[in-house]
Amino acid sequence: MRESEKEKKILLKRYWERRKGIRNEMSLFGKIYEIIFILTIIIILVYIFYLSHIYEVEEYFLIFLYLCFIILPLLIIFSIINKKALKKYNIKVKKKRINFCIYCNGKIEVFSNVCPYYRKKLDYRHDNVVEANKIERKFKKKSAENESVLLEQEEVISFSQKSFALIFIGSTIVMIIVFAIIVLFLLGARAMISTIIGGSIILLCYIIVVYFNVLLTIISKFTISKHAIKLIIEKQVYFQIIWADIKDIEIFKITFKGYFLKMNTLQNYELIGLKFCDFNKNKQEKIIEALFKFSEKLNKPISIKKAFGPFIDDIGMKELYDKIYNFARSQRFILKRNY
């Protein structure tokens, strides 16, 4: 209970700090417009609520549409003002992210909590990280339930490009043919031709959807064996490390952003966002389950934490995704996502 309350406080604090920072970058007109916009929305919502208690839905439906037309341009103007302020805010945040050690004034990387010169641990960098004991116990339990003998290796693939397209499009073609035959017997040849034409249009739309889905997806394969951990993006090795070089593994869970793996060695670390490699929630959990299983058998420390705030901020998220995206884009044309 205390853990969840702490998380809520950190999330709220982070949100208000960010909102305050964006608002500070607005012009005087922007700040005044924001107040007017919020008050207008509140008045309109109160008015709609008032109408809903007096009249039937059909009677005030046109008024509701009219109010929506009023809100829309106001919302567009506010989003433009907010976007400009956000851009200025991100530039300032990026400059502030160049951190310096409080002991020797040496430059520290954004995701590190150890000074590379003084080798002093900087605990203040982890103020917004809490222990995720419940999640950790869940993965340890799953690991214990599995067979005690380790497999040679375990693989998790983010997306099977060919199989998905074939199953999706193939099943649609079969459905169109079956439906057309049924219509032929029930309604005749003309109705069947209309069904085939309509089905073909739907199939074309499906093919376009599948095509764009493929263009938005980074094909990734995460392999864990007794010897090494390997991440392949498209057809090239993006990251590889042998267990002997691993000091410990930290796993950070971030709300709406999934799991981040931090592979620590004696000299350095590698941070990987599993969602940025297009692993869905289930596949992320499979990877973590396998990591727990292998790390426990190989006596390597592993832990799960929940991270907030400056530990991995929006700029850091973008940098992590861009690194993976540019690596994948060098091998295949891929459309960029907004994370």
Image (cartoon, rainbow, N blue to C red):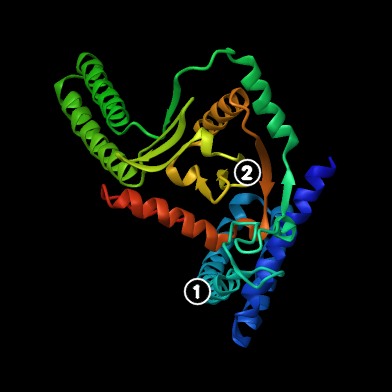
Q: Please identify, in this view, whether the residue under mark 2 or under mark 1 is nearer the observer.
A: 2
Give the percent coordinates (x, y) of residue 218: 36, 43
Name the amino acid type tagged 1: Ile
Closer-to-camera residue (82/93): 93
Residue furthest toward the bottom? 28
In the rendered structure, the answer to whether residue 27 lies left or right of residue 306 reads left
Residue at 76% of width from left, 51% of height from top?
8
Closer-to-camera residue (236/296): 296
Image quadrant holding the N terminus, namely: top right
Occupied quadrant, residue 50: bottom right
Mark identifier at residue 29: none
Residue at 74% of width from left, 53% of height from top?
53
Q: Which residue is mark 2?
A: 253
Mark identifier at residue 80: 1
Density class for disc 1 (Cα within 10 Å; few <14, some 14-19, many ≥20) is few
Q: CA distance from mark 2 to mark 1?
A: 32 Å
Identify the secondary structure beneath mark 1: helix
